[in-house]
Every structure is written in C-alpha cells, then in structure tokens.
Amino acid sequence: MLHSILLLLLLLAFIVFPDDAAAFTAAPLTRYPGRPSLSDVSLQAKKAKKSKPKGGGGGFGAKPATAPSVASISADKHALEAQWDTFASVTDLEIAPPGDPDDEDYEHFIVADVFVRIGPGEDEEGTGWYRTGKAMAAGDAADIRKALTLQKGLIFWTASHMWPQLASKGKAAATRMELGYAPPSMTMADETDGVLDEEEGEDVMVSQRVDVKGVSAKEVGFRPDFNPPGFTYKRRERAAMKKKKSALEEIADAS
C-alpha cells in the first residue's frame, strides 16, 4: 500500500513539476556541472601542451622561449652535403657573381665569411672567433642574414667538428655559441689556425635571427673552409671545376 502511494506521488511530480523532476535523473559519472568531461579535459591538456612555447634548452642553435618559430636546416652530415652542394653549384666557388647585372644570364648571389665563437658565461670566459667557412644567399632578393638564420644550427654543428677547441667546452658552452659574419674575402682557415686576433675580430658582426618566411633551402648554401675530420665531400666541386677554376679553389688546392 505504502509502495503504491510513493509511486503515485512520483508520477504526479513528473506531470506537475517536470523541470524539478528532471533533477532526479542521474548525470554521467564523467561530467560535473559546469565542467568538461574527463575525456574533454584530456584533449584540452594535450592541446595546451602542444601549443605551449618550447624553452631554449641545450644544444646548438637552441631558441629562447620567446623567439618566434622559424624554419631551419638540419644540423647533420646529410644537410652539410646538401648545402655545400648548393653553395658550389650557385657560386662556382666565386665570392662575387661574375658578369654584368644587366646581362640576361646574370645570376645574383651574396657570399659572406662566417665565424663561430662561444660567448662568456656567468663564471666563464668565452672564446675568440674561429673562421669556419662561407655562406651564400642567391636570388634577386638575396639576404645573407636569412642564409645565416636558416643555416645557423648547421654551421654550429660543423664548427664543433672542425674545431676541437669549441667542442671541448662541453654542452653548457654550446648554448652560448654565437655566429658571426664579415664581407667575403679570399682568406680560408686550416686545421692549424687558432682564433682571430683582436684586430681581425673587430670586423666580425654578430648574426641576428631574422624572418625567413618564403626562403627556400635551395637559395642558401654553406661551405666549410676545410673538411671536418672524417668527412670528405668534393663531388660537386669537382664537377664545378670542370667548367672553370676559381681563385678560391686555387687557394684551397694550395692549402
């Protein structure tokens, strides 16, 4: 009897107060009033982590947390071959484009000498500039700063293999590596060289990161002044020199 009365009262509640009666229905266990479900929380966490700015961290060419994300060229042997190949094919190992800019077959490019050093730390001294090679930017709108930005990690990687004095400083010092550049010259380094003297170092400008949107890896190149130990790459240069012999290659042959 009592059971029948309770059922009748509950039925009347649904009819007379439908909104209030709905409050008796069970909510999903994974959802709380005003909060996303547990599955939604998981997805949001993944998105937040994915979009979270990455810190500078260690390693060569590390970016500060506030730096804009830009494209870069890999820092490894394959990338060095590719960029060396591009440098040789575009420049024919010249430091300035030959011919008249008004000629139809004129191809514009810019070359710069590049240097690497380790900046001073909180309790450590830095190093002087080590001459490392030459960088190239091609095209009518060639900008050597963009070539340096794209290839910064690769140049650091190469310099650390060319100069044991840099690599021996360790990983902490690698985060303080700086890239420098100067107008192109016929001067090339060899394994027996040390840092530039103070007077030479005054001509080196510290490279700053610039926007590289729209720049192709095929429009920039890099050639180290000498092969890092255990690395040889002359294929493209031999092909280029079948066409012509540049003063730059003559210096390389004599070294």
Image: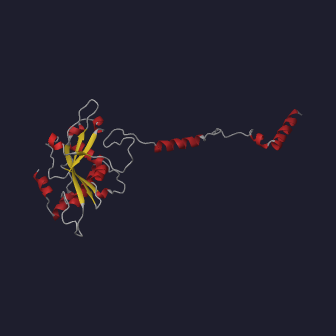
Q: Quadrant of residue 143?
A: bottom left
The image shows a total of numbered marks equal to: 0
- Determine the residue positioned at 50% across, 44% down: 47
Q: Is residue 19 left or right of residue 203?
A: right
**Residue 37 picture quarter:** top right
Q: Position of residue 43 (x, y in %)?
A: 54, 44
Q: Nearer the viewer, residue 231 or 107?
A: 107
**Of 73 and 105, the residue lying toward us:** 105
Q: Residue at x 27, y 29 (%)?
A: 123
> In the rendered image, which quarter is residue 250 located in?
bottom left
Q: Position of residue 124 (x, y in %)?
A: 25, 31
Above or below 169: residue 81: below
Percent position of residue 99, x then y: 18, 65
Q: Locate the N terminus and report the quarter of the image it occupies.
A: top right
Residue 184 position within the rendered picture, expressed as x and y whole percent measured from the top left = 19, 53
* Residue 12 visible: yes
Please tell me which residue lies in front, 201 or 221.
201
